[in-house]
C-alpha cells in the first residue's frame, strides 16, 4: 500500500479520493485549509495549510509516494503544485483535471464551444494551463484525469469507461461521471499505471 497526499482533501473530488484511498488500505496525508472534519480518521494525517504556501506544501509532501491534486485551477497556478511535488521527491502526481480541454466530435475543444457556460470559463482555462504546464515537464511522472462534462454527486457504482482526449458521451446523449466513480478510476490508475505522462478521461 502507498502513502499518498491529497491536496484539497475536503472538496467534493478530494473527499471522494480520500474515502476511496482509505477503502483500499492506503495511508493519506490530507491537505486542506480547514481540515477539521478529518480529525480522528484512522489512516489520515491532517495538514492544515494553504497550498499557495510553497514551503509548507513541500514539507507536507515529504515521504509520500504519490500526490493527488484536487485543488481548484482558478485559485492555484500550476507551478504552485508542480514545483513543491518535484522538490519533495514524490514519485507521481495525479491531477483531478477538467473537461474544458477535451475535444468534441467536431474536433473543437469543449471550452471553445458557443454554449460553454461563462461562469465556468476561469476554472476551465486554469485546467488548460495546468495540462499545458504538465506537458512541458521533463522530470515528473504525471497523470491528468479529465471528468466528463457533468461532474456530479452520486452513487459509487464501480462502473466507468475510459477515453483519451475526446469527451465521452453516452448512448443517451449525456456526458457525466460521479465524484465517487471518478475516484475509483484515479485510484485504479495509481495502483495499475496506464497513463504515465498522459491525460485521459472517464465517463459512463
Image (cartoon, rainbow, N blue to C red):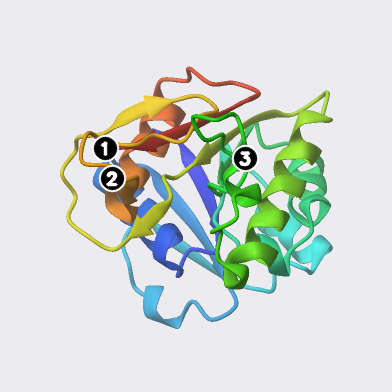
Judged left or right of residue 42, residue 119 is right
Image point 45% across, 70% down: which residue?
A: 10
Mark 3 or mark 2, which is nearer the start of the sequence?
3
Q: Considering depth in this image, is 68 or 59 the residue closer to the camera?
A: 68
Whether residue 139 is visible, yes or no, is yes
Image point 36% across, 45% down: which residue?
A: 182
User: Which residue is denoted by mark 1 in the rendering?
Assistant: 204
Residue 25 spot, x, y in % from top left: 30, 42
Image point 67% across, 60% down: which residue?
A: 73
Q: Are marks 1 and 2 in contact (CB under 8 Å)?
A: yes
Residue 55 spot, x, y in % from top left: 82, 62
Residue 106 spot, x, y in % from top left: 55, 30
Q: Considering depth in this image, is 175 or 98 the residue closer to the camera?
A: 175
User: Which residue is denoted by mark 2 in the rendering?
Assistant: 181
Observer-side mark, 1 or 3, equals 3
- How many residues crowd around disc 1 within 10 Å: few (fewer than 14), some, or many (20 or more)? some
Name above or below for residue 112 compared with residue 49: above
Amino acid at each position: 500500500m502507498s502513502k499518498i497526499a491529497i491536496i484539497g482533501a475536503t472538496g467534493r473530488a478530494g473527499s471522494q479520493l480520500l474515502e476511496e484511498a482509505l477503502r483500499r488500505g492506503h495511508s493519506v496525508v490530507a491537505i486542506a485549509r480547514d481540515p477539521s472534519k478529518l480529525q480522528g480518521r484512522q489512516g489520515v494525517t491532517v495538514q492544515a495549510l494553504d497550498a499557495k504556501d510553497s514551503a509548507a506544501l513541500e514539507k507536507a509532501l515529504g515521504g509520500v509516494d504519490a500526490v493527488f491534486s484536487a485543488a481548484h485551477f482558478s485559485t492555484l497556478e500550476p507551478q504552485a503544485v508542480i514545483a513543491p511535488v518535484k522538490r519533495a521527491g514524490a514519485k507521481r502526481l495525479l491531477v483531478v483535471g477538467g473537461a474544458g480541454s477535451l475535444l468534441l466530435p467536431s474536433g473543437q475543444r469543449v471550452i471553445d464551444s458557443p454554449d460553454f457556460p461563462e461562469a465556468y470559463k476561469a476554472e476551465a482555462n486554469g485546467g488548460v494551463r495546468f495540462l499545458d504546464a504538465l506537458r512541458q515537464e521533463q522530470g515528473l511522472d504525471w497523470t491528468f484525469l479529465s471528468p466528463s462534462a457533468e461532474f456530479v454527486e452520486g452513487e459509487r457504482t464501480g462502473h466507468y469507461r475510459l477515453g483519451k482526449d475526446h469527451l465521452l458521451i453516452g448512448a443517451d446523449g449525456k456526458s457525466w461521471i460521479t465524484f465517487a466513480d471518478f475516484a475509483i478510476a484515479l485510484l485504479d490508475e495509481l495502483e495499475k499505471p496506464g497513463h504515465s505522462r498522459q491525460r485521459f478521461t472517464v465517463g459512463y
